[in-house]
Amino acid sequence: MSASRKIQIMLVVVALLSMTMIGAVSMPDTVGQAAQAEAAMKLGRITIVNESDKPAYLYLWGENYYYFSANAGETKVYTPEADEYDYELISCGVKTKGTFTLSSLKRFVIPECGSKGLRQPNTSRTVDAGRLVKLTRVVLTNETDGYMIVILRGPSEFVFSMQADEELEITIPKGEYEYTMYGCGTTQVGNMYAYPHYEKEFVCK
């Protein structure tokens, strides 16, 4: 083998070794950057305990946006980034809003609609939706001889339809409502105050 041929082979070997060494140095650097980025993102933990018979929805707005849900009777755990959030919670057909700082753990309890799931007050780590919106059970009765529609406007707005002689138990936020009843071939307007065990009868006038 000629001397020039040997020199060419040696140059190729040196070049391959150099490329290998460069790759070996750069790869740990890339992996290290990824590990640092992952460590810098601190995650919190949100638990939704839904004891009601309706689905619950939780929306979060912070540096990032999140949407979580839990079906009736379901407990779900989520791990969003730790941050300060504006939230909107929809449970038992009622929407509530607020803010909280998620540093580690946060627990949302949705009790049976119209009841409170906790004996203790809300804390920085636990929110009782029943206590938050002050839900109460009331009974609407259609004492007319026909179909009617009732619209309630107050802390929240609701629309109910009822057949003749139907009794409807509902769960709504406690407070004063204006009602509009369409039935009996006419329209009735009035006021009612929703509190525990309240009953409202609608009759033709």
Image (cartoon, helix red, strand yellow):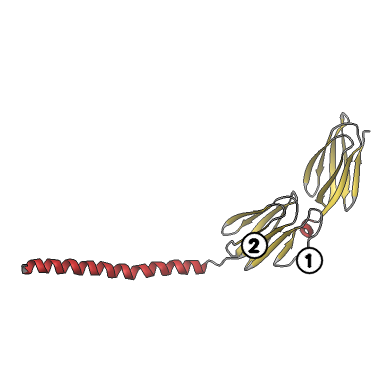
Per the image, label 2 sits on a secondary structure element best described as strand
| Three-letter residue code for mark 1 | Pro
Residue 42: x and y in percent read 55, 67
Residue 122: x and y in percent read 75, 65
| Residue position for label 2 | 46
Residue 192: x and y in percent read 88, 46
The quadrant of the rendering that contains the C terminus is top right
What is the total number of numbered labels drawn onto the structure image? Answer: 2
Q: Quadrant of residue 158?
A: top right
Circle 2 residues within 10 Å: few <14, some 14–19, many ≥20: many
Residue 24: x and y in percent read 32, 69
Per the image, label 1 sits on a secondary structure element best described as loop
Numbered disc in front, either 1 or 2? 2
Task: Give left or right: position of 27 versus 36.
Answer: left
- Callout 1–callout 2 Cβ contact below 8 Å: no
Whether residue 52 is visible here, answered yes or no, is: yes
| Three-letter residue code for mark 2 | Ile
